[in-house]
Image (tube, helix red, strand yellow):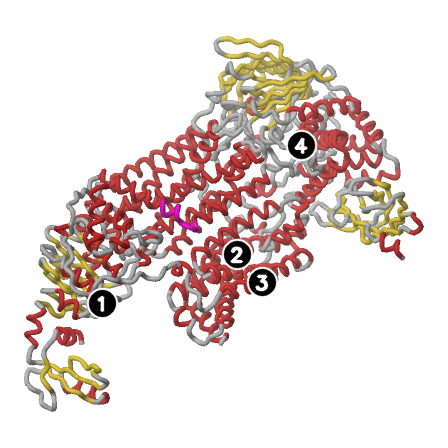
Amino acid sequence: MFASIFSFEVRRLVRSISTYIYFLILFLVGFLIALIAGGAFKEANMQFGGEKVFANAPTIVDALFSGIDNFVGLIIIVAVIGNAVLKDFSSNTYTMIFTTPVSKFHYLFGRFSASLFICLFILTAPAFGMMLGYATPWVNPDRVTTLNMASYAYTYLQTIIPNTIITGTIFFAVSLIARDIFVIWLSLIVFFVARGVSNSITSTLDNQTLAALTDPMGNLAKRALSKYWSAYEDNHLYYKLRGLFLANRLIWMGLSCIVWTIGYSFFSFTSSPRRLAFRKPKLADNTKLTFVPSFIRSSELPAVTRSFTNSANLKNLWGLSVNECVALWRNTYFRIIMLFGMVLLFLSATQLGKIYETTVFPVTYVIIEQLGGTFLLFMIIVTIMFSGELVWKSRDFKMSNIVDALPVPNWVFYVSKIAGLIFMQVLLLAVIMLCGVVVQLFKGYTHIELLLYVKYLLGFRLIDLIMLAVLAVFVQTLVSNKYVGYFIIVLFYIWNTTFASIVLKRSLFVFSSDPGMVYSDMNSFGHGVFPYYVFKVYWGAFCILLAVLSSLLWARGSENNLRLRWINARHKANRTSWRVATAALALFMAAGGYIYFNTSVLNTYRTDFQQEELQAQYEKKFKKFEHAPQPKITDVQLSVDIFPQERGLHTAGTFVLQNKSKFAIDSVHVLLTASIKVNALGFSRPAQLLLNDSDYAYRIYKLAQPLQPGDTITLSFNLAMETKGFRENFSGLSRPLYNGTFVNNQDFLPSIGYDHNYELADNSQRKKHELGYRPTANAITDSVQYQRNVFTHDADFITFDATVSTVPDQIAVAPGYLLKEWTDKGRRYFHYKMDGKILNFYSFLSARYTVKKEVFNNVSLEIYYQTGHEYNLNRMFNGMKKSLQYYTAQFSPYQHKQVRILEFPRYATFAQSFPNTIPFSEGIGFIADVDDSSKENVDYPFYVTAHEVAHQWFAHQIVGANVEGSNMLSESLAQYGSIMVLEKEYGEDRLRKFLHIEMDNYLRSRANEAEKEKPLERVDDGQGYILYQKGGIVMHAMNKYIGEDSMNHALRRFIDRYAFQGPPYPTTLDFVAALRQSTPDSLQYFITDAFEKITIYDNKITAAKLDSTGGKYTVNVTVDSKKLSADSTGKETPVASNDYIEIGVYKKKNAVLSMAMYKLKGGETKLLIPVSERPYKVVIDPRLLVIDKKLDDNEQKLDGGSVLDKK
Amino acid sequence: MLRISNLSKTYPNGVKALTDVTLNISNGMFGLLGPNGAGKSTLMRTIATLQDADSGTIMFGDIDVAKQKQELRKVLGYLPQEFGVYPKVSAEEMLHYIARLKGVANDKERKELVKALLEQVNLYNHRNKSLGGYSGGMKQRFGIAQALIGNPKLIIVDEPTAGLDPAERLRFNNLLSEIGENIVIILSTHLVDDVSELCEDMAIIAGGKVVQRGNPEDLVLGLENKVWSKRVGKDEVSRYQSEYKLILAKLSGGSMKVFINSDTDPGNGFKPEHATLEDIYFSNIS
């Protein structure tokens, strides 16, 4: 019985064309993704897993293959398996089949296994598509390695098959319980969204195991296995079915058995399809049978006036629209969706803007973005689903026979459907608003900006949703089957949101696109509004075109032949519609032209590839001048006028240039930004403009008289930065803003001499543009580069004076001390002068600031902030105080009399230290909601402040030479300073949380290293994970190993020797030497390991027992220590060790009983640690002094003690 | 006056639904008789603007149906062969909805009209019930009520009695017989009785073609004295079929009775029978 059901069903599916269409779609998606990953599109840079990982490495194949099947494939699984039984209801064959003597189990299991079998066949398609894609000559041969069937096989066997069984079972069970195709699709949404939300909630470090087990697709389990894998491992290893991954597979296979059984028990042959089950018993017709003349005569019906004018149509339209809305409102499914959505929103509200696992205050825009972001996919799917429901409603309910023959023009029907959809979308957006306000109030936050909700949701979010609705209805109008329509829309949507911009590049070709828009409390929607709406007018016009076509081609009656509908559409009666279409087309073209004019005529548009090419040409043209001796800037006098409303900036000023070389200089190279307008530029001595390359704004002036060594010359200039029109993509900083301008000198002022930093740095890009290999930084031994510092190639230390002007309601700030403030001709002027010498790196800010000041040890502390962002000012002040105190006491005096923190819009999220000036993004810290009662929270406003203040020492006092490693002298040392301040303020326990996050971050990032991981001593500028994360951990550990006094003594000596010194600048070699001086011989190995090598440990406690005989407690512990040395590709080899590792015994969770260093050889060591009280746990390396690959095996609870007692 | 000229329609799957159909239909009740699949519904839907023919024209007065669909819809009342219901919508709400779409914009007038219609089709007591709960006969009465809205000049009733029990059919036909006056009413059906009870003019359609046309009584008269019957064994039917012009063979009281068409007495035990419309029907479609 089972066999015949199975084979009948398989044969039916094999004959079905849809099986092959599904296969083809998955095949094509696999093919396209393989091409993109393999770099076939020269201008598309989409890399999965770092540059050194091949596009068809086992891990990447796994991610792509299972990714395609888990998303697109899942839709197909639902379509095939969800329908396995349901089709008997929809085609009414159930009455026949359920009355045969087939057993329920044979019937259900036969149907299920047959459709599962076919699904498993269909789901192999991406593998073949990918194999073909990687084999095409179009892919970049450097990105692809030889075909490895095993990687596809592993993925198929370990991921695809179990996932198909799991998801197939779930949706099969849903189909048995619900017996309604709509509910099945609904449950698919629930599944998608719930998966996303649960993944985001369980994404914290502590929840990794939980997340790995709860993800039904096994992705997080695989990620837990491989998250620290190096490129080498990514290229060579397969996921092994063990540990968490195996547990995950077993749990979910087990669960799916249960789910299957539940579904099975819910189903019986007496079941009927759900929607029909609502049918009530029929009313009996009790009218008499004898002939009774009725009054049915049309002539005798009450006379009515009928009108078919446009106003009547509009009235009908209103009526119909209200009808659609009411129907939606009454729709049970819609109500379920709304409820589910609310639950979802509340769940996601627990994760507000986490940084360092610490949330932010529920400020309105954060709420909108967080909830709106979570809800977006949901709203998109609901829009797509209901567009199909509404378009097909009259046909699905067989009302079209009546309704379509009514004298109502198509457009009235069409618009009423769109109105219904918009009504639904507005309701969903209202749900966001409602939940948002509830969340805000619930969290005790009362500054609720209702107007912002309305603007954000209705002014921006709704537009895209409406366009999607128009598109979806258009597709549904054309197709002859609702589900085909859904499939087309979903495919198009995936194409449009992920691939279109890569393949087609210009947003003009990406449906419903816009340049992007970022809301900022400081700058509101700012300059993003106008271009946003221009793009929306452009796409709006296109949508009107779609709308007219939809209404002209509206399917009425049983005619779904598109050709006949097209003939009908062309009838004279539709002239008005065609006029509207023509007007829309004209508007579409005009808006498109206007966009092109703005993005490509007023501004320059370059694809990534063109931008790279520009940089490559720069190097090819000008590299020869790199070593031409150039004078250095020694004094800067500026007058900067900021025009926030026009987004312009004028500057006039002078640079004093001095020849610090040993050679006479006959020509000066002046570099500007190409978009800067030069009103005047000249020297204090006669000079001739020898070369003026406008593409690069590269000028060479030949001096009539060469500049002799030691001589000076003055460069004076008058420049203008103007903002014309808008660009293809939203850009925030580095140009004046309506409120919150933050520009630095590199954005608009000249620099002197060839700038190495403008070269293409990425070596794979260099190859693409026919440039040779370039080391990522100058060699540490390149003593020529000791003459320049790592930040500014054209100056050492300078004197600085600037007058900044802005509009009257804003405060303008530059480095230095305010000498004078005045107003003249409606503008507000500030004159700043720096007393000491600073780096040639300074910023200008202007905004409607509120200022709060405090004085601490004769230093004026100031915070310039946006009103409303007062939350963390005290934490920041505290950070400034504690760090000034620590650094002044431990390192050297503070060189300025003032520290200023200035808020800037959240277009970028960083803080940066300029001389006595710290611009600080509103996106980090200002709205952080640090919970002091929680041991888990990191007070990052405090920590970031401490870090930036530390830069006043490490960067602005000490600056390294222009060679590899030098950034460590600013970033890792600043990190050290802030970690020490954080530890003093919050104690070791809470620091541990911070270090744990940092260590995880380091280990994950090094796995994705694109070039090669360098030792800390030679770290590159771009290797933030080494500079910050590893640097901080290592410096903190040094402090613990050699003691705070020795450590800070070394730093003091180093600062004393190099602070404010011009060339030659120090390197990390000098720093490490200074450290070695303060380090005993027994610990010199640690410096070698930490700074000169890449060293990683795998420490764990393998066994721990408590011996409490005679009232004395002894911890009997076996520890296993393994030291690994990694090469630059991430390949690790075990090395012999005999190192100091700390072991702590704790009374309670955090109370220390014993904490000591043990010299451990590699491998297992048994230790006896006597303690005075009953201990709770033993931990190896509790303070995270060494980098450990796996931290969760570093501690064991000691609960064996009580058993021993009884013996 | 409805003039259908040379109407043809072939479906994408190759089924020829209509082949060169030409019919002129004047005011009064017109019966369109044919077996299932003859093309009746295709013709009805094409007249009702729900479908397009491949060739040929339909003129209703001055209205060219294919090109002026909107104009025809203004004078059309249509009761489709099959129609469903929206969930949670009552008969009264639905009538209001349709009336509004038929251009009855004035709220007060519409209210009166709906009330009158509900009373006339005897559904007033059930007006608040969901249409989903109506019996077949009640649903068809609702269907006729909605078709009558807006004073239609052309009413198309497509297989209204299919699926009704005999009593319901009787009631419905009673109702239908009261409508016809100075308008064109087309009733399509596969039941001979419907036509003989209600129509003065009719056509028989089979295989997409009009095979017979005329007044039902005239048609029957034309066959008078030409129908003969005989009881035969079941195994003999095929022999009779080859030897005579067989109209139909049907069971009668447990044994087989064959009806043949013959201008003269065929002898051989055949007895004369009164001609009926059923004989016309079967002799045209066999």
| Residue A427 shows in this picture | yes
Q: Is residue A330 on the magenta stretch?
A: yes
Left of A1122 or right of it: where is A572? left
Amino acid bearing label 4: Tyr
Report the front residue among A275 and A507. A275
Report the front residue among A312 and A993. A312
Disc 4 and disc 3 in contact, CB within 8 angstroms = no
User: Label 1, on which residue?
Assistant: B167
Which residues fall within the magenta stretch?
Answer: A326-333
Classified by dominant secondary structure, the portion drawn in magenta counts as helix
Q: Nearer the observer, disc 4 or disc 1?
A: 1
Query: Can marks 1 and 3 be said to lie on one chain?
Result: no
Task: Tell me which residue sits at (29%, 49%) in the image.
Answer: B93
User: Label 4, on which residue?
Assistant: A940
Q: CA distance from mark 3 to mark 2?
A: 23 Å
Q: CA distance from mark 1 to mark 3?
A: 53 Å
Q: CA distance from mark 4 to mark 2?
A: 40 Å
Tell me which numbered mark, 4 or 3, is placed earlier along the sequence. Answer: 3
> Within 10 angstroms of label 4, few (less than 14), some, or many (20 or more) residues?
many
User: Label 2, on which residue?
Assistant: A69
Tell me the subunit letter for badge 3.
Answer: A
Q: CA distance from mark 4 to mark 1?
A: 84 Å
Tell me which numbered mark, 4 or 2, is placed earlier along the sequence. Answer: 2
Q: Nearer the observer, disc 2 or disc 1?
A: 1
